[in-house]
Amino acid sequence: MKRKNAPPVTLQGSKSSAQGLEQRSFQDRSVRKSRNADVSGVIEEEYGKYLIKAGILSGNSVARAFPKPPAKTQAMIADAVGETPASAIDALKEVLEARDRNRSDQRRLEGNSGTLVPGEREYIEALRQIRFTPAQITILKALSIAGKEGLTVGQLSHAAGYTSREASIKVFKKIGLMVAEYLELDLPDPGTAQNDGAVQVLAFSHIEGEDEPATWVMHQELRNAVRSVL
């Protein structure tokens, strides 16, 4: 139950430039906390895919959420204030839960596979935080460039520089698993090699005819994210 007269909570993007400076100061103190156990007043707690850091900032109890390591960056995702660092953490967890529920509700059902497709902003966040290998980035870019036409496994292997179709499929699945793990997605049943649950996080398969190979078409939301980030 939400507490009466609860302090306001905010998402990133509503802060002024002065508060941005305070954010960097808070992050610096949090980093020092991890390096120096004598630094007092900063609490760190893992919460799902987030790392929460809480402490006293300018006389206020503040809690802020960041991507949990090994994310590439430590950009703040959300924050909240409270009477104490502990109550600020509780308030922040409510913000994060609401954020995740809202994202889940907005996911699109892909009719070709029955997969719930994340929104573009979710994909963008995942692409910015996951540490992809050069081969994985090549595959993402190749599928993005292919657009609605998509690529067969053979074409994808050629674009990524693989002589083995099995190797390219393995990398393809790994990308899907990484994105699913970061976004905490429930993967559909694996099915066949051409209808793998992890791959469906990235694309859906299309078959023109019985004698034609399956073509993988990247979800529009992910295509936009790849073109924006990678």
Image: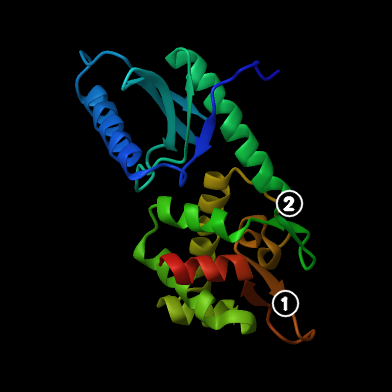
Which residue is found at the position 43% from the left and 16% from the top?
85
Q: How far from the left and from the top, in percent, is residue 66? A: 42, 37
Q: Which residue is mark 1?
A: 206
* Mark 2 secondary-structure assignment: loop
Q: Quadrant of the C terminus?
A: bottom left
Q: Earlier in the sequence, mark 2 or mark 1?
A: 2
The front one of 62 and 90 is 62
Which residue is found at the position 43% from the left and 76% from the top?
160
Q: Residue 73 — which label?
A: none
* Mark 1 secondary-structure assignment: strand
Callout 1 amino acid: His
Q: Is residue 48 visible?
A: no
Relative vertical location of residue 82 with respect to residue 117 in this rendering, above or below = above
Relative vertical location of residue 28 with respect to residue 228 in this rendering, above or below = above
The front one of 225 and 80 is 80
Which residue is found at the position 33% from the left and 36% from the top?
23
Callout 2 amino acid: Asp
Q: Residue 189 — which label?
A: 2
Q: How far from the left and from the top, in percent, is residue 74? A: 35, 42
Q: Is residue 188 visible?
A: yes
Relative vertical location of residue 172 with respect to residue 63 in this rendering, above or below = below
Estimate how packed mark 1 is, as few (under 14), some (14 to 19) or many (20 or more) residues with alpha carbons within 10 Å.
many
Q: Answer left or right for 22 relative to 143.
A: left
Q: How far from the left and from the top, in percent, is residue 162? A: 43, 75
